[in-house]
Image: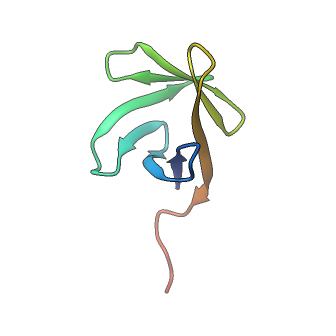
Amino acid sequence: MGYRGLIDPQGEQFGYLHGATLYTLDDEATGRVQGEFMLDMEGNRMWRIEGDAVYKMDGTPVGYLGEVRPDEFDY
C-alpha cells in the first residue's frame, strides 16, 4: 500500500497518508481521501487535492503529498 508524507509549504512533514487515511505524526487518524477532497473524520471537506498539491477550500496552499514510500523497508 505505501505511505505518502504530507509536507507543508516550508518543507516540513506534518502528517502522512496511508491508503486513503490521513494521520498525524503521532499516528492519530484525522481524515480520509475521497475523490479529490480530504475529509475530516466527520466527513466534512477540509482540503482539495490537485495532483500532489493540497489546498484549503479557499485556495490557500496547505502543502503537498510526497512520493509513495513502501510499507516495509529492506535494510
Residue 25 is at least partly visible in this image:
yes
Looking at this view, name the residue that lies furthest to the right: 51
Say which of 66 and 11 sits in front.
11
Report the side of 42 relative to 45 (left or right).
Answer: left
Residue 1 is at least partly visible in this image:
no
Report the side of 18 relative to 23 (left or right).
Answer: right
Residue at 32 percent across and 16 percent down: it is 42
Image coordinates for residue 70, horizontal then vertical, percent: 54, 64
Report the side of 3 relative to 29 (left or right).
Answer: right
Report the side of 6 relative to 43 (left or right).
Answer: right
For residue 61, above or below residue 28:
above
Image coordinates for residue 33, horizontal then vertical, percent: 51, 29
The part of the image, by quadrant, that contains residue 67 is bottom right
Image coordinates for residue 35, horizontal then vertical, percent: 60, 22
Looking at this view, name the residue that lies furthest to the front: 10
Residue at 49 percent across and 75 percent down: it is 73
